[in-house]
DNA sequence: ATGAAAGCGCTAACAA
DNA sequence: TTGTTAGCGCTTTCAT
């Protein structure tokens, strides 16, 4: 009985023995043909290929993985799939993965350590060929589980508080970037620069706050740091509270990530505060929209694609050395109209 | 010899027989404990858990998949991971996946049929529990391979030219949305509305162009359709050519996706054309930045999260019916200052 | 409640 | 060049 439409669904997927029977050869020969290993006469190879094609044969991945004790899959576990920073980084990983014949799957922890832990357990269970991870939290991450497995790991973007000294990493010099942005705001004449950063324990949030402090202390200014959630709504709330209140009002804000900067700008607009006239603004991470919003944003740009590519390269060249490798990339300040 | 750092790497991952030996039970008992199947005395169960924990035991996924002939993994194959439309949709899938105890992995075809084909073969090889796919191309897709396998499939966002009648789908009424946007531009007084849409053969591009035509023909206006690549740069180039040239210049542009709209706006700005004074602009897809750019964008908003959620629901409720299920969701016009 | 044993689909030794 | 065979780690009868 035909199934729906023109494409009929087979009762079950063909297996190697089906192909072998159809081609009149042994399973071993089919395996050799499919993998290009060993030696098979051209005539038989052709028959095998024909049979495989006719049956729509696709080797069963788990059986191969079991037999070979390896997979050709990398996982990228990222903290927020909706943040263009991470998606751009993923492109860098993907390109290397393809070059070395690996597949890349993406896992979104959504900044949730429980979800992250589940993906980490999965990566171990699948004995992934490699994992690139931006940890959800410097403290609570299950990264240790991954490190005590045999799965190659590279951390990116965020430093792991507990495990930094044991794992390869690709990071950006967040402190320097934040300091540069803050110094820039001060040089433009800001008297009180506030900082909206991310959750405590997330290394990017902490390091950017420290860079901010460096700059403020250098001029003996007043520190004003607020924590939010690295999301647009959090940036909005933080800036709204900060500037709607009756206390001393900042005349510049350094916002420590791209999405929060959007929220910050929205809050300033809702409060009727001109940017940069009333409040100067600088963000962290460039994004597709930074030149199009009003005013165009001054940001600390990160080499996102390169971060991914470098991480993947570390995965490819498994270290025989005792010491983990740490790659630190430099961010760059891009000055636009918002400051 | 201790490995680097405090976390020592085991020579090899523990297997079920190791745990069985350590706990003084059979492998079958360990399996029963790990899976909560069968019956095991509390005392033994505890010993097994302790041993498993001590050895850091994690059941080998491929072996389980081989034995059980099933996986608990869904794949989402999307055309462009950098487009927030897809990432928002993925959230909808993820939430359902978690509810039903499945894992979701993301695959980025990057609008490339070859890459898409590779991911499709992978999905078949892994006998994925389900695949949600936004096809790279209505024509060239390897979707047929997937349909003739036993892997449950739902298409989203883009219609498959060849296979639409055989596969579950969740789509948006692109034609109606595009028509609404174009009518809106005309009502605002535009005399010549141009349309920048995506590649021929991508259903969203084609359907949005048709909706545009519907509106233009209704007023007996002139049609002016340009094809680009659904990316920011493509939108820029298309609009730049269109308005820098000496021919008859449009006084409104309907741009058929979110990223191209950013490019279009940039082009208009570079040409010194005021929006909406000289050229009215409307886009397709809402995005986090649409209210923050200057001017805020009039767009056709799509229920992105719901698209993903509905697709996942179709995956969960495998149809016993002969006919595939088609869910069509309604977009809505959001009028802002750009028009 | 527990263990022994078979076997999932594939590949890699080994034999011929 | 090709086939036979063992076994990867796990789950699931089938006995007990």
Image (tube, coloured by chain):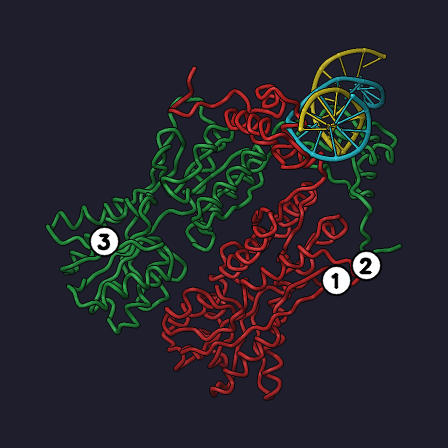
Chain colours: A red, B green, C cyan, D yellow
Residue B236 falls left or right of residue D11: left
Real-space CA distance between mark 3 and mark 1, rounded to the nearest whole angstrom:
55 Å
Instruction: Tell me the residue that label 1 is attached to.
Output: A324
Q: Residues within 10 Å of mark 1 (few under 14, many from 20)?
A: some
| Residue under pointer 3 | B225
Side of B93 relative to A273 (left or right):
right
**Residue at x 44%, y 65% (from the top left corner):** A263
In the rendered view, tell whether residue A82 sits above or below residue B328: below
* Residue B32 at least partly seen: no
Query: Which of the pair A250/C5 is nearer the observer?
Result: C5
- Label 2 sits on residue: B4
Residues flagged by tags 3 and 2 on a common chain: yes
Residue at coordinates 65% horizontally, 51% vertically from top-left? A131
Q: Is label 2 in a helix, a strand or a loop?
A: loop
Asked if residue A255 is positioned above or below residue B112 in the image, the reply reads below
Give the spatial CA distance, label 1 vs label 2. Answer: 8 Å
Q: Chain of mark 2?
A: B
Q: Which of the two labelled residues, at mark 3 and mark 2, occupies the earlier sequence position?
A: 2
Q: Position of residue A224 (x, y in %)?
A: 56, 77
Name the residue rendered at 61%, 67% in the picture: A204
Residue B261 visible in the snapshot: yes
* Chain letter for mark 3: B
The N terminus of chain A is located in which quarter? top left
Give the position of the C terminus of chain A as an image quadrant.
bottom left
Q: Secondary structure at mark 3?
A: strand
Quadrant of residue A3 in the image?
top left
Structural distance between the alpha carbons of marks 3 and 2 = 62 Å
Q: Are marks 1 and 2 in contact (CB under 8 Å)?
A: yes
Subunit bearing disc 1? A
């Amino acid at each position: 009985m035909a199934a729906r439409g023109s494409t009929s669904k087979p009762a079950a997927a063909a297996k190697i023995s089906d192909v072998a029977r159809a081609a009149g050869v042994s399973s071993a020969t089919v395996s050799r043909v499919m993998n290009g290993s060993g030696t098979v006469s051209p005539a038989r190879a052709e028959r095998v290929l024909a049979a495989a094609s006719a049956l729509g044969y696709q080797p069963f991945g788990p059986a191969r993985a079991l037999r070979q004790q390896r997979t050709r899959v990398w996982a990228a576990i990222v903290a927020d799939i909706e943040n263009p920073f991470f998606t751009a980084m993923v492109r860098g990983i993907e390109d290397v993965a393809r070059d070395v014949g690996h597949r890349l799957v993406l896992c979104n922890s959504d900044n949730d350590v429980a979800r992250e832990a589940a993906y980490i357990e999965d990566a171990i269970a699948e004995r992934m060929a490699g994992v690139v991870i931006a940890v959800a939290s410097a403290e609570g991450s299950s990264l240790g589980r991954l490190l005590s497995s045999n799965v190659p790991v590279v951390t990116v973007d965020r430093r792991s508080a507990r495990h930094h000294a044991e794992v390869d990493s690709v990071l950006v010099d967040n402190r320097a970037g934040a300091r540069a942005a803050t110094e820039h705001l001060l040089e433009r004449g800001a008297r009180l620069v506030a900082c909206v950063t991310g959750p405590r324990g997330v290394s990017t949030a902490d390091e950017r706050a420290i860079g901010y402090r460096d700059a403020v202390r250098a001029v003996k200014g007043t520190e004003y740091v607020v924590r939010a959630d690295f999301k647009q709504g959090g940036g909005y709330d933080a800036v709204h509270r900060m500037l709607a209140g009756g206390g001393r009002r900042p005349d510049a804000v350094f916002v420590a990530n791209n999405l929060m900067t959007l929220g910050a700008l929205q809050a300033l607009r809702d409060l009727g505060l001109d940017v940069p006239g009333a409040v100067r603004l600088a963000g962290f991470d460039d994004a597709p929209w930074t030149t199009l919003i009003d005013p165009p944003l001054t940001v600390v740009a990160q080499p996102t694609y390169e971060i991914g590519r470098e991480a993947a390269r570390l995965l490819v060249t498994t270290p025989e050395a005792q010491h983990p490798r740490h790659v630190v990339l430099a961010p760059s300040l891009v000055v636009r109209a918002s400051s």
